[in-house]
Image (spheres, grey):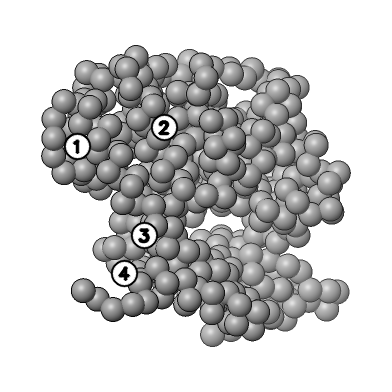
Amino acid sequence: MIEAELGRCVAAWYPGATGVTGAAKLSGGASQETWTFDIVHPSGNVGAILRRAPPGYGASPGRAAGLDAEATLMQLAHDAGLPSPRVMHVLKPEDELGTGFIMQRIEGETIARKILRDEQFAQARPILARQLGGVVAGIHGLPAAKLPKLREMTATKEIADLDREYRSFGRPRPVFELALRWLRERDPGPSREVTLVHGDFRHGNLIIGPDGVRAVLDWELAHFGDPMEDLGWICVNSWRFGEIDKPVGGFGSREDLFAGYEAAGRKADPDRVMFWEVMGTLRWGIMCCGMMQRFRQGPDHSMERAMIGRRSSETEIDLLRLLAPKGK
Amino acid sequence: MQDEPTPTELIKAVADFLRNEIAPAIKGHNAFKLRVAINGLDLVTRQLALEGDSESAEAARLKQLLGIDGALLDLNRALSDKIASGEVDLQTPGLADHLWQTTMDKLAVDQPNYASYKRELGNK
């Protein structure tokens, strides 16, 4: 079992550790898994998270930054004082756990519906947008010289990728065509400033406590590009979970997000953020169609994937609200 | 002619059974999956009820917009091509209304509780 391997691994670098307990898989596709466990120690157990590609799954797919890069980014963010778990150990071949890393487990909530509705987050909600503006500014300002090798994206490349993926499904969707055309006509070209972009800065990848944001997770889609992409992505309506009048994650305003960003010494460009919000809405819609495709072609023939396919229409109404608002 | 009950009646009966008798007894991840399953059945019921009228109205609008006749999939392909080429855009009379109506009809089946949809229903 994984606890035996983890126990041996942990004993090699955590002084005094006698083993691990309570290992449970939190999520996992075929190629990447996340496990939670406790390191057993005489002075008290320590919560930890394993993020790994199991043995035999070395290469990361398509857009993924790779687990080594994720570990580096997470540690850099931690060192810069950003809310990020400390990386405790990068897996080595002799660990026999595959590739990946072990990090500190940070307690808190990632489920959007709870963050948006539960009483314990009532104090956090009004401050989150501004806080996150500061956090994402910190990410964009991480020292370039220390960053790992990552793919570089531009708006033009992203539009081309989305176009290619949409067309590969072979099913016409006039609203997506309209969005692709709109994006092409307004493509701002290469960003004047290219920075580290988190790439998936939204609910699910943010650990929130009653005091606010505690950690940014999941750097799998990190890349170099237009920093406004992260600000646009977190405003996509799909992450508002019904609170559609609060564009930032269903808890805050763009103004607060931008104020936090600017207080950290960076400048937000609202038009460009809106451009990336449209791109992000289309991107999530195309991802939903991709889920349906994977459901149909297997091997993951799951009902959940099938039903996510029926959520692409949500992004169509959101695209129309952005591009062709009624009564205007 | 197939016998009764109709597919709609059967699916609704199954969904109600799962919702009322089974769901209260299931916990954990399977409870989540059961909710997804019931949502799937409810979606099919809505589609069976709504799709006939909405698709014939959609086809009629497309014929008007494009000036051609054909199967719904082919008409949508033709419209998509024209939007992609820029031949048709939001200034084209009827396009925005068509896309809105078609999208609202999809949401009525897929996610009638989606907040953007409920907002736009109220804006009519």
Q: Are marks 3 and 2 in contact (CB under 8 Å)?
A: no
Sequence-first tag of 3 and 2? 3
Q: Give SS at disc 1.
A: helix
Q: CA distance from mark 3 to mark 1?
A: 22 Å
Q: CA distance from mark 4 to mark 1?
A: 32 Å
Q: Are marks 2 and 1 on the same chain?
A: yes
Neighbourhood count class around disc 1 (C-alpha, 10 Å): few under 14, some 14–19, many 20 upward: many
Q: Give SS at disc 2.
A: helix
Q: Which residue is mark 3?
A: B48
Q: Are marks 4 and 1 on the same chain?
A: no
Q: Give SS at disc 4.
A: loop
Q: Which residue is mark 1?
A: B75
The nearer-to-camera label among 4 and 2 is: 2
Amino acid on which the number 3 mark rests in the picture: Leu
Amino acid on which the number 4 mark rests in the picture: Pro
- Is any part of residue A188 visible from this angle? yes
Q: How many marks?
A: 4
Tell me where residue B111 appears, x and y as whole percent: 50, 51
Q: Give SS at disc 3.
A: helix
Q: Label 3 is found on which chain of the structure?
A: B
In which quadrant is the N terminus of chain A drawn? bottom right
Q: CA distance from mark 2 to mark 1?
A: 17 Å
- Is any part of residue A196 visible from this angle? no
Tell me where residue B101 appears, x and y as whole percent: 40, 35
Tell me where residue A127 appears, x and y as whole percent: 80, 36
Q: Which residue is mark 4?
A: A299
